Amino acid sequence: FLDYSDDYFHEIFLDLPFSESIHILYLHPSKTSPFIRHVVATLLGFYLALFCFGWYALHFLVQSGLAYGVMIFTGVEHMHKYCFVVTLGYLSFCQVTRVYVFDYGMYSADFTGPMMVITQKITSLAFEIHDGLMKREEHLKPSQKYLAVRKMPSLLEYLSYNCNFMGILAGPTCSYNDYVAFIEGRCYEPKHLESNGKENGKFKQSDPSPKVRDVIQKVCTCALSLMVYLVIYTACPTERVIDDTFMASNPFYIQVLYLYISMLALRPKYYFVWTLADAINNAAGFGFNGYNTDGTPKWDRISNLRILNIEFATSFKMFLDNWNIQTALWLKRVCYERCPYNPTAATFLLSAIWHGAYPGYYLTFITGIVVTMAARAVRHNVRQHFLGSATLKLIYDMITWFSTQMAICYTVVPFVLLAVGPSLKFYRSVMRLH
């Protein structure tokens, strides 16, 4: 759930030609030093930020500067906590003033969108530095060992990571180690972690430049997503579900069907942004994730979604695991794995704060806590009764798919409506239908 407006779409197109021509053709690691690559990535990022957001882009520098000051002038033992509070606090301040001081409901060229990604990067880096410099190796989880940063980044490296032109407009978030490996040309023979935490060894040492096919395929996905959103969602806006005339003139099943179609048509808006951002990074050579079994390179290292897994999800968790993947990983690494009390509720609350000041966000994520708990209980108590045969398993999957889609629709509507009044009106209409 990232708040990108229709006007915001065209801005990230600016990155695509920059990425391919500069980093692949002119600034390849074999031809250029990491220092020059950092400088160019940073300066182009600031240029794009100024072009799209004007002087509001200075907030990116202020937020990054405050956090870097905390990293330098506070002890490593508590630096990650202070960075987290300062960075998230500054983001929240900007979101509140944008919503309640300037223009409620304003989405066009929303400068807090990039700040949300920068917040993820700063806080992730702070925890990674803390893990690398303060914790003993045996106290780290396998993923934390891979992500741990063993030395304090220079100011240039830090700004390049936060504000590089490939991710300044729409992300996605990546780990600091992965970004530096890309800049230094070491990303093509990494040791990747398997699900059990073991390393699967080095792949063949080559420089697999992104195939035109990989980028074009993602751009085509973007075009299809944009077309679906502009055609279907324009005809079926979510706001109609609380229209008195619509509710009075249509039976229950029509309202449910309309809600599902509306949510189905809304999601391609996010598919467009995240897939295009992924393509931009791939065009620059970033996002390599090893090789398939047939030897072809994979370019999904920083992908943010798996569309088919989302649309055919048979559980609330499966949906969330494949939606906004990099944000889910951030929430897991900085909150869920580290929170000593009720990590599920804390993670949903952090997600609500990070998203912004609209009340609908909080209604959505509070509802998400309840739905997650209920889904866990149902799966724990019911699923085993449907594993006796393939037919029963198919019936179970069909029921859980339908239930998941309805749960997502019910949970997400306040996120779209934003305000308390329309959201409560939706809840009341659902209660009347039942």
Image: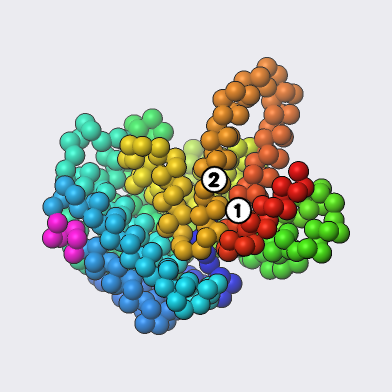
Say few, some or many: other residues with alpha carbon within 10 Å of mark 1 (under 14 / 14 to 19 / 20 or more). many
* Any part of residue 256 in sight: yes
Compared with residue 351, is residue 212 higher up or lower down, i.e. above or below?
A: below
Regarding mark 1 in the picture, which secondary structure is present there? helix
Q: Which residue is mark 1?
A: 412
* Residue type highlighted by circle 1: Val
* Residue type highlighted by circle 2: Gly
Q: Which residue is mark 2?
A: 368
Q: Residue at (53%, 67%) from the top-left corner? A: 4
Compared with residue 93, is residue 125 higher up or lower down, i.e. above or below?
A: above
Regarding mark 2 in the picture, which secondary structure is present there? helix
Left or right, 257 with reference to 141: right
Residue furthest to the top: 388
Q: Residue at (40%, 61%) from the top-left corner? A: 117
* Any part of residue 50 in sight: no
- Count of marks overlaid on the render: 2
Which image quadrant is residue 42 in? bottom left
Label at residue 351: none
Q: Report x, y in % for residue 353.
A: 43, 57
Say few, some or many: other residues with alpha carbon within 10 Å of mark 2 (under 14 / 14 to 19 / 20 or more). many
In the image, which residues are magenta? 69-74
Between 274 and 398, which is closer to the camera in this rendering?
398
Between 103 and 421, which is closer to the camera in this rendering?
421
Q: How is the image coloured?
A: rainbow
Look at the image and tell me in which quarter the C terminus lies.
Answer: top right
Q: Report x, y in % for residue 151.
A: 16, 52
Between 310 and 82, which is closer to the camera in this rendering?
82
